[in-house]
Amino acid sequence: MTTRKTIPLTLSMLLLTGFILRGEELRAKEFVFKGEVFGKIGAAWPNDVDDGLGRGLVFGGGAGYMLSDRWEVVVEVQSQQNSLDHGPGSFFHEGQLLTIGGNFQYHFSKSRLQPYLRLGLNYARFDGARGFRADDNNPETRVEGKQGFWRPDLGFGCKIFISEHVSIEPEARLYLGGLPKYDPAWDPVNPNLVRTEFNIGLGYHW
């Protein structure tokens, strides 16, 4: 084998060996941290008693603090833009949902892969409108307004550490019905809606 072929092959083998050794090191290591900051992006499917609110992209971020090696408390802010419109004569819904909340997470592992369950309570603020589009026989009906309500959430996810301080965090959540009582004459959203959300985050830990 010529020197020209030997050098690239040797470098490739050394690089592959380095990746393997690094992976073994991360698998064997315990990832215990005191705090984190993170950002998330995802999609949600809210449901109203009249119809679905439509899919919407979710953007958010927050911070967490470990109360013990298993329990973490997290505060978070999220924003979601909703839009649903099927044309003349159909139900429509549009607006922005801002959510501020806190949750507890229980981590099942201290390894590189840390699955967890979460239980949270959130204050949601919706600013938007709903109604029915005009058609040949009927004018448009529209209810606009701002509305705030409380609601709990349940979820599960996993922190996947790609380095000692950085993790990727896929997660699924179910937001349950909230308070106060719904007044269809004035409220643009029924607070008893149930919302399913899937997101993925990037976290920095220390």
Image: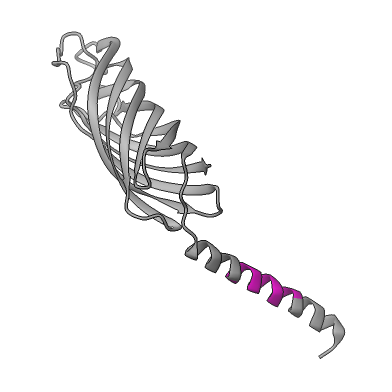
Q: Residue furthest right?
A: 3
Residue at (69% x, 70% y) in the render: 15
Taking 187 as reference, is 111 above or below it? below
Residue at (29% x, 9% y) in the render: 145
Q: Residue furthest front?
A: 68
Identify the image quadrant of residue 141: top left
List x then y, in percent, for residue 114: 39, 53
Residue at (32% x, 41% y) in the render: 105
| Predominant secondary structure, magenta span | helix
Identify the image quadrant of residue 87: top left
Q: Please say whether residue 55 is one of the residues in the magenta stretch.
A: no
List x then y, in percent, for residue 196: 27, 38
Left or right of residue 114, residue 46 in this image: left
Front residue of this view, candidates 106 and 117: 106
Taking 31 as reference, is 125 above or below it? above
Quadrant containing the N terminus in the rendered view: bottom right
Report the number of discs: 0
- Magenta residues span 11-20
Colour convention of the picture:
one colour
Identify the image quadrant of residue 173: top left
| Observer able to see residue 90 | no
Residue at (70% x, 74% y) in the render: 14
Front residue of this view, candidates 138 and 180: 180
Left or right of residue 56, residue 175 in this image: left
List x then y, in percent, for residue 18: 65, 69
Left or right of residue 189, residue 74 in this image: right
